[in-house]
Image: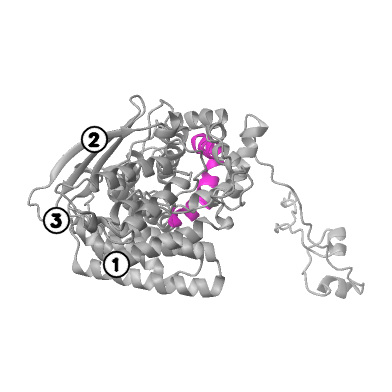
Amino acid sequence: MPAASRPARRRRWHQKTFSGCLRCKQRHVKCGEEKPACQKCINLGVSCPGYKLPLTRLFELKPSKHFDCKEDELNYDFFVRDGVETVASAQSTSLRFWTRLAPQLAENDAGIRHGLIALGAILRPLHNAPIERRLDRPRQALQMPPSAARHARQALNCMKVLDCGVLPVEVSLTYCILSRELAIWTEKEPSPVDHLLIAHGILQSKSVHNLGVSWMAHNDLLATFVPLVDQLLVHACSYSDDFPPVDSGLLSNYQLVNGLERIQTVSTWADALDSIASLLKSVFRVTCPFIVSTDAELGYILCSLNMFEEKLQKIRAESGLAGDYLHLQVHHRVAHIMFHTLGQDDEWKYDKFQPDFYFIVEQMKMMLASRCWGYSKWNDDDTVGHHAARLSPTLGWIAPLWFVATKCRDSYLRQQALRLLHDLRRAERGWTSCMAAAIARFVIEEEQKPVSPVSDADMSGSSAIYHLERRVELNEVEFCSKERKVFLAYTVSGKYDTVAEKCIDSIPYTPHPTVEKDNGETCPMSRKVLRHCGYSGILLYSPHIDCHCADLAG
């Protein structure tokens, strides 16, 4: 019989391991990996040499080359390192977006990367630039660098192909917010709204089911973009004319008390600045006759005004920042007066607040004379404090003084405010202290024109309130660089008049490069900003300028 055939013997399969002891690995046998000595070495009667320490592989992550030149890389690094916090200081809800999300998306998206490089190129020269007091120096300092213009164009070209159905939702929203920021710095637009409405539409159309991301990622996106877009919408509702549009789906009273809840947690000067900015926006909108507000909203705003004053006193006691405290206190007092007068449509209501106007003027004197704020009327050299030489958030100096000069009818106080206003020598988003002083001077002169004979006894006394029969309320202001005039539309009313008189007039005007666009036209002032006495939100840069009054320019 033939011999029985047997299959070839094969070693039983086992998973290969690389974590055994050194002796078992040398013998090519499976180790039990017992500690401190494996069982196989003990059975053999030999000492177990132990286990090899895990090898940690160290390597350096090298970013891919996204920059055309070294200058672009420096501008990008500056913005990611320092510029993001500067830009975010204007909107408290944007810190997470600028510091985390935007730099992350810029690694893979060329449009976002070009936008951040452009912002870095604009902000880097201003970050540590010295304060210049000559007219030609601000013209050069505020001119947009060529690299910023080039990258801004490239970023906008990439963003023109915005397709919300193709791009990820976070990229589409970043395009909208970045386009708005570029328009503010490159086109000197105080509150661009086109891309903001697109961002609002994206957030309204995207739901949990069609975002295409996980539940955690969806919540993270909502936590980043929803508060930011809401705050930007409230900003546009406060300072942009004809906003919101009828077809936008937004009501004029959209989130009237947005941001006021943060007053309860104010602990730093930055928190307080953001809170008073939100409080001013709520006061501006709730006093508008075309916006419907409830008694609960009015009460909440009034309580917030009182609470903010308590927070200010606490910050003053803990920090001891005298100049910063005065700055916040002035704007809080302005908000207090406006809350009780702005919606009354009665210019005589302001006569009840003479102590408050006096308080504002005295506080502004103390603040503007302080070197820590970079202002010194009596110092003509260029060596001023470093605080004003840097990009820093503020609500401005022009608006409070212009408010006193145009609304206070005490001759001594309004003349003091007018003199301080002219001596400011600053440019603040769309207008300068000289432009504001010229308009305020026109209002004062118009109100001093009597419509009936007035005796010298009625006008005597430097500190007495003028019992003027004319009160002027500005309705619209238009700056015309070509004609070198400021056209003013205003209403003149008497205390016992039943019908107010509508008037149009003009005053001389000398343009200044800090408020001119690339086409040479002066930035327009919206009717809302004029109604709010020049307030237009938190400013990041307000340079010193030389006087450019029309009567001095010749």
Q: For residue 495, which numbered disc appears in the image?
A: 3
Label 1 sits on a secondary structure element that is helix
Q: Residue most toward the right? A: 46
Q: Amino acid at mark 1?
A: Ile
Label 3 sits on a secondary structure element that is loop
Report if residue 275 is visible in the image: no
Label 2 sits on a secondary structure element that is strand
Q: Which residue does the numbered mark 1 point to in the structure image?
A: 301
Q: Amino acid at mark 2?
A: Asp
- CA gap between label 2 and label 1 equals 37 Å
In percent of width and height, residue 323 lies at 53, 62
In percent of width and height, residue 539 lies at 45, 49
Q: Looking at the image, is mark 2 or mark 1 earlier in the sequence?
A: 1
Principal secondary structure, stretch drawn in magenta? helix
Residue 24 lies in quadrant: bottom right
Q: Which residue does the numbered mark 2 point to in the structure image?
A: 505
